[in-house]
């Protein structure tokens, strides 16, 4: 949820009334309040724009626990799905895997949204911070929690699977290349770095554009409803996983990550070749988030409250250089 707006995947503040723990209706804040506050956001200090106070807010740190646990469960479930579908004897493991991933992500988002806003993905936290729905400080706290949670989820998975399966399937992590037996000894198979980077950028941008956009836009979130929006997020992610794993048809490439924390967790626990090209799973989504933010600034303001958010990135830059309107 976003502060002072009816958003999904922002922060939990819009569900609370006056700092209490009483959950409010999903669309409780009138639109005029957004416009009124937008006029007040032009003279904020850099510290206020960055939300430095969030580092000292107990509520933010408590919300980050939801991100930590949500990410741990997400990594455990998704990596288990990856291993089990390819280990099972089915004709189209990619399709089965994508459907199961869509279901799991939808359920987990529904569970975590009331606690922290339901990010469980650095892509969502970073893009929400750029757009201004949450502060950059809160985003940093969430992303650290997500990475720690991903490591815990990968450790849990390693504890329940055999070493053979963990090695064969790279603990369900994000891979670009793997070492495979060849006619004259081991060979490296997979995708070229440039191709993997472009796929990561494209898939992450589509993820933001086709689903997360609905969660950020208070009008669509209100019209469609929480369950519908989060279901769309899960379905879009599932489709992108299916597309990225089938369009290349490259053995060794695990598909677009679209979640740097999930890739990071498996790489820390499994190590080895999972670190080869690991930067792609961070750089690609970062570029996509920036591109998505630029898109939100290009479209007509009436279609998106791009100038009405307290933590908007351009507002941060203006405050940094004293360029108040």
Image (spheres, rainbow, N blue to C red):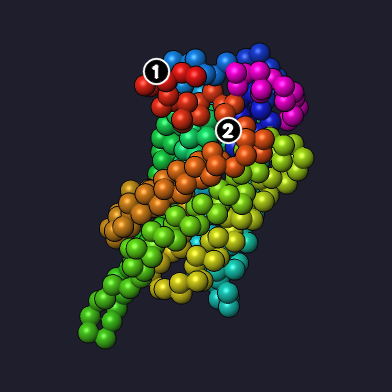
Query: What x and y, as percent, mark residue 289?
Result: 47, 44
Report the disc number at residue 306. Answer: 2
Query: What x and y, as percent, mark residue 211?
Result: 62, 49
> Outermost residue toward the left?
184
Write the start and end of the magenta stretch as one range: 25-39
Q: Earlier in the sequence, mark 2 or mark 1?
A: 2
Tell me how far mark 2 sits from mark 1, CA to CA: 20 Å
Q: Nearer the viewer, residue 131 or 117?
A: 131
Is 85 placed above or below 296 here?
Answer: below
Task: Give the residue drawn at x 28%, y 72%.
Answer: 188
Q: Residues within 10 Å of mark 1 (few under 14, many from 20)?
A: few
Q: Secondary structure at mark 1?
A: loop
Quarter of the rendering containing residue 93: bottom right
Is 66 placed above or below 84 here?
Answer: above
Membership of 35 in magenta stretch: yes
Membership of 71 in magenta stretch: no
Q: Nearer the viewer, residue 175 or 272?
A: 175
Report the disc number at residue 322. Answer: 1
Query: What x and y, as percent, mark residue 175?
Result: 38, 61
Q: Secondary structure at mark 2?
A: loop
Is 43 placed above or below 117 here?
Answer: above
Report the disc number at residue 202. Answer: none
Task: Give the residue drawn at x 37%, y 49%.
Answer: 283
Q: Main secondary structure of the magenta part?
A: helix
Query: What x and y, as percent, mark residue 87?
Result: 50, 70
Q: Are marks 2 and 1 in contact (CB under 8 Å)?
A: no
């Amino acid at each position: 949820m976003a502060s002072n707006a009816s958003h999904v995947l922002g922060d939990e503040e819009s569900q609370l009334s006056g700092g209490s723990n009483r959950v409010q209706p999903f669309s409780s804040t009138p639109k005029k309040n957004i416009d009124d506050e937008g006029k007040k956001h032009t003279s904020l200090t850099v510290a206020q724009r960055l939300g430095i106070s969030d580092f000292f807010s107990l509520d933010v740190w408590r919300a980050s626990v939801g991100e930590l646990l949500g990410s741990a469960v997400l990594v455990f479930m998704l990596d288990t799905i990856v291993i089990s579908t390819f280990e099972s004897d089915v004709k189209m493991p990619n399709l089965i895997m994508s459907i199961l991933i869509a279901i799991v992500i939808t359920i987990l988002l529904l569970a975590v949204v009331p606690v922290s806003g339901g990010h469980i993905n650095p892509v969502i936290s970073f893009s929400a911070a750029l757009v201004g729905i949450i502060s950059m400080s809160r985003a940093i706290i969430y992303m650290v929690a997500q990475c720690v949670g991903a490591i815990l989820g990968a450790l849990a998975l390693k504890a329940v699977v055999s070493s053979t399966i963990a090695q064969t399937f790279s603990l369900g992590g994000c891979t670009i290349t793997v070492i495979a037996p060849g006619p004259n000894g081991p060979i490296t198979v997979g995708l070229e770095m440039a191709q993997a980077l472009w796929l990561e950028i494209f898939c992450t941008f589509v993820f933001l554009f086709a689903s997360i956009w609905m969660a950020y836009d208070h009008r669509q979130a209100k019209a469609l409803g929480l369950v519908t929006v989060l279901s769309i997020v899960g379905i879009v992610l599932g489709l992108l996983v299916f597309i990225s794993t089938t369009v290349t048809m490259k053995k060794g490439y695990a598909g677009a990550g679209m979640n740097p924390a999930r890739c990071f967790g498996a790489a820390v626990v499994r190590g080895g070749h999972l670190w080869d090209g690991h930067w792609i799973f961070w750089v690609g989504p970062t570029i996509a988030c920036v591109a998505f933010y630029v898109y939100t600034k290009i479209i007509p303001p009436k279609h998106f409250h791009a100038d009405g958010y307290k933590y908007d990135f351009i507002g941060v830059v203006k405050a940094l250089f004293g360029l108040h309107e």
